Image: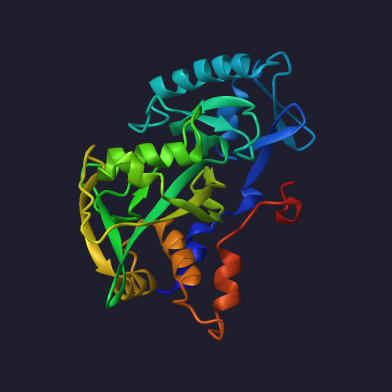
């Protein structure tokens, strides 16, 4: 196991298996060849032409698109398409978070439609005489995804209708009992983007990285059941755990690798330095073969 192995795991997508789908002339996401027949059952919503799929032009406002696609997704849910992952949480559909969303889509459906999801990931750290220490979260053993794995101090998906920083402040309170006045001191410092595939699902996601220096006498505590427990680790232990194991949730490794780079734990003389830094920001482009 190595840092590059984690980057490769997050960027395992075979984009040749997907075709783009569009809202008007804007690419909204990607459909896997095995999921496309499901979409094709609704030609009133999706039609295929010119090597891609197109949402019906009659759905000419974000609200109309949201309502029509939601009705379809509810039908799929009733057929068992999304298992037990349906959350009643609407995500914005669009490539840049700062753009007005083309529509909203239920969180559980987003990877099936290859829609980019966003989210804040925060590393809480403490400065001590013997160096940096990081607060590590262990995910609840009852979570439906990655139960019991290690996680960033605070992290969450990005629903519609709230800014990234405000969402982080909310997640800090809910997950770690970090009061808003302290959470607002978190600073956006970087971002991670990757192209991860799980069967017919594609996650071309972007995580916004935040750092928060916490007081030495503050201890995060689990609040909403998302986290089993928090532990304060020396940064070297975190570094070695990420480098040598798969104990952290797969994409959380990349946030921590970025932290290691920014805080000088990786040397520029390391033969993998350039590959590691460049690998933290993978995008899909026309050069990937799917336009």
Identify the coloring: rainbow
Q: Quadrant of residue 133?
A: bottom left
28 is higher (above) or lower (below) than 252: above
Q: Is residue 144 visible?
A: no
How far across and down, in percent of the image, does residue 47 sit?
70, 24
| Quadrant, the N terminus | bottom left
Q: Residue furthest right?
A: 50
How far across and down, in percent of the image, does residue 183 sit?
36, 45
Residue at point 35% right, 42% down? 181
Residue at point 55% right, 79% down? 272
Q: Is residue 228 visible?
A: yes
257 or 32, nearer to the observer:
257
269 left or right of 48 in image: left
How far across and down, in percent of the image, does residue 115 sit?
57, 38
Q: Quadrant of residue 86?
A: top left
How far across and down, in percent of the image, does residue 159 sit?
47, 32
289 left or right of 126 in image: right
221 or 85, nearer to the observer:
221
Residue at point 55% right, 31% down? 92
179 or 278, nearer to the observer:
179
7 is higher (above) or lower (below) than 285: below
201 or 91, nearer to the observer:
91
148 is higher (above) or lower (below) than 37: below
């Amino acid at each position: 196991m190595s840092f590059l192995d984690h980057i490769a795991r997050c960027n395992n997508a075979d984009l040749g298996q997907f075709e783009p789908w569009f809202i008007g002339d804007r690419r909204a996401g990607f459909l896997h060849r095995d999921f496309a027949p499901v979409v094709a059952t609704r030609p009133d919503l999706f039609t295929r032409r010119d090597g891609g799929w197109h949402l019906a032009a009659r759905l000419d406002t974000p609200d109309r698109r949201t309502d029509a696609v939601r009705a379809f997704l509810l039908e799929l849910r009733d057929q068992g398409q999304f298992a037990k992952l349906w959350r009643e949480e609407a995500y914005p559909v669009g490539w840049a978070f700062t753009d007005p969303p083309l529509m909203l889509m239920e969180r559980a459906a987003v990877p099936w439609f290859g829609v980019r999801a966003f989210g804040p990931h925060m590393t809480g750290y403490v400065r001590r005489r013997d160096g940096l220490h990081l607060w590590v979260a262990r995910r609840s053993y009852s979570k439906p995804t990655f139960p019991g794995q290690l996680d960033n101090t605070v992290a969450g998906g990005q629903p519609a209708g709230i800014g990234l920083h405000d969402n982080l402040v909310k997640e800090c309170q809910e997950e770690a009992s970090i009061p808003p006045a302290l959470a607002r001191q978190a600073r956006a410092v970087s971002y991670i983007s990757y192209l991860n595939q799980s069967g017919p699902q594609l996650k071309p996601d972007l995580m916004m990285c935040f750092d928060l220096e916490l007081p030495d006498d503050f201890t995060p505590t689990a609040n909403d059941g998302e986290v089993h427990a928090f532990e304060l680790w020396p940064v070297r232990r975190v570094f070695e755990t990420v480098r040598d194991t798969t104990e952290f949730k797969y994409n959380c490794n990349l946030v921590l690798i970025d932290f290691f780079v920014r805080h000088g734990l990786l040397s520029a003389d390391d033969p993998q330095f350039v590959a590691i830094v460049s690998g933290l920001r993978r995008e899909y482009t026309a050069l990937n073969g799917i336009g």
